[in-house]
Every structure is written in C-alpha cells, then in structure tokens.
Image: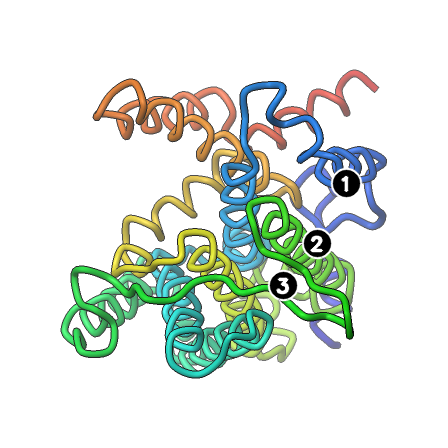
Amino acid sequence: MSASQSAAKLQPARGAGGPATRPHPGTLVLALVLISLPLWITHVGGYTDIVSRVLIYALAAMGLNLLLGFTGGLSFGHAAYFGIGSYVVGLMLKHATHSVPLALLVGTVTGGIIATVLAPLCVRLRGIYFAMITIAIGQLFYFVAIRWASVTGGYDGLTGFSRHAIHALPGVTWTLGSTGFYYLVLLCFALGAWLIYAVLNSPLGHSFVAVRENQKRLRFLGVNVHYYAAASFAISGFIVALAGGLNALLDNFTSPNSLSNNLSGDLVIIAVLGGMRNFWGPFVGAAIFVLVRDYASNVTNNWMTVIGLIFVLSVMFFPMGIMGFLQRKGKVRS
C-alpha cells in the first residue's frame, strides 16, 4: 500500500487540517483586492511597501507551514533558507548581473538545494530533537554570514545592490518602483501559493498529512516516512528562499538578521497565529504580525511585547489559529 493510499484512510476532515479539495470563493475576492490594492491603499492610510512585506512574510510562512502544519515538523531554523536566498540575490545583483529574475531564480534554487541536501539529515529526528537540529543548522549559517565579512559584510550586512528594471519584451520595460515591485511580489506570491496548493491536493500532499497524522502506522505499512518528510522539507526550503530573495529586493539590503533564529521564530508565530492547519492561515497571520509590528514600533520600543501578548491570547482562545476558529464557527453555524 502506498503512502497516498494510506493517507486516504488517515485523511482528517478538511476542518481538521487536511488539504483543500477546491479553491474557496473568497480566494477570488482576495485576488481582486490584492490586484487593485495600489489604487486605493493610500486612501486608507497605507502604502504598497508594507503590503509587499506582508506578502513576502506570508509566502515564507506558507512555505514553512507546508512542513509545520501539513507534515508535522516543527522547524525553528527555516530563516537559514530565507537568509540564503536573500544573500544570494544581493550578491548576484552586486557582482554578477542586473537581471532581477535571474538573481531571484539563482537565490531560490540555491536556498532550495541546500534545504534538499540537509533534509534527509534533519527528518531522521523527531519532535524536540528535530527542532533542535534545525536551530543548530540555522545558527551555523548565521555565524557563517557574520564571520565571512569579506563577502557578506558581516554584522553591517550586505549593501551595494538595488532593483533594476525588467526588460520583459523588446520595447517593454517593467520598472520596479514601489508599485512595480509590489506586482512582482504579488506574482511570486501567487506562483508560490499555487505550487503549495497543487502539492497539497496531489497524492504527495495527502501523504504529507498522513505523515503528520500517524507515522507509526505508515512505517508498519512499509512506507518510507523519511522520504516524504524530506520532500516536504525541501519544497518548503525553495519557497522560503524565494521569499528571502524578495525581501532583499524590498530593502535593497540584507543582514545576518535574515538568518537569525528570531526570524525563524517569527515565521512559526505567524503560522500558528493565523492557523497552521489552514491553507490561508499564514497569510492572515502575516498580515496581523507585520501591520501590528509596523504600528506598534512607531508607538513604543517594546513592540515585541504587543506581538507576544497577541500570540498568547491567540493560543489561549484560538488554539487552531484565527482561520481555524473562523472555519470551525462557519461549520457550526451551517
């Protein structure tokens, strides 16, 4: 019996954290809101760069959530792949090319390949030991970025690169100002979300959920659990690396902070806050996290206290996350 066949028996109800079988009608509304956002965001006191950051963090958290929420692997080291993507994009634009798509591609592939190589080592451990080895790997890359100052800039970070216009077709130039870059981020977010959705609604995605639900049973059936866990780890690494590259382009700067365990913890908080067993949960969590951080940091230097309080309240009153709570309420009412 294959893992996907086993998953069919182990598959929980959709509300319990299984992959969605078809897009929710609200997805179309969300798409229309995001596409039209530059036309109205300034009228409500916002700006496109903050929404670009929301989408970047949402993409990174959705990539992590493929491993965390749907496969059951708690990683506190995924900032490593975020930071690798960020640094590679910066180094490519500074030393090798002015092509933003090429830099993004190389950054994504580099971070993803490193995640793929490290995945078999990590997934052989479970529970707290899995979390600990991901922390150790994250710290390894963090200290490499600090010590290799001649390349990375050390504590000061990597500067000297910037976004360049994309010459998509002869005579057609895509300028990457605030609005142009927002649409680039939106395009990458849409592609990343589509990839995650396609994976989750494939036999592979159902196998991920089976790994989360009952590894012991899968082993008894002769399924190589490590293979599927490693596949989830690798795919999430590619997506998180893409988000890291976009983050470097947003700031025209990257630093060891993009590799830190603090960022890894932020991504976990975002996924849990929004609902780690819900497809759109990390997006909701990223919107809350980034917007609250942006507002609170303008009011007080203790903005992390505000984030921590929101997280504690969420865990206490919405243990399945905000989207999980709303989905459950909708089912109860129906």
What residue is pinned by disc 2? 190
Q: Mark 1, mark 3: which one is toward the viewer?
A: 1
Residue 27, given in percent of the width and then of the height, sits at 78, 39
Q: Mark 3, mark 2: which one is toward the viewer?
A: 2
Mark 3, Cα crowd under 10 Å, few <14 / some 14-19 / many 20+, is many
Q: Nearer the viewer, residue 313 or 222?
A: 313
Question: Relative to 14, is 70 on the left or the right?
Answer: left
Res. 28 image quadrant: top right
What residue is pinned by disc 1? 31
Q: Nearer the viewer, residue 271 or 47?
A: 47
What residue is pinned by disc 3? 208
Mark 1 or mark 3: whose residue is earlier in sequence: 1
Mark 2 or mark 1: whose residue is earlier in sequence: 1
**Mark 2 to mark 1 CA distance (whole Å):** 9 Å
**Mark 1 to mark 3 CA distance (whole Å):** 27 Å
Report the quarter where the N terminus lies: bottom right
Q: Residue at x 59, y 64 (%)?
A: 165
The image's mark for residue 256 is none
Task: Note whether residue 206 is visible.
Answer: no
Q: Residue at x 45, y 25 (%)?
A: 314
Mark 3 or mark 2: whose residue is earlier in sequence: 2
In this view, 147 is above or below 54: below
Q: Nearer the viewer, residue 83 or 261?
A: 83
User: Element type at marker 2?
Assistant: helix
Residue 294, given in percent of the width and then of the height, sits at 39, 29
Q: Nearer the viewer, residue 38 or 233?
A: 38
Tell me the kind of residue under disc 2: Ala
Tell me the kind of residue under disc 1: Ala
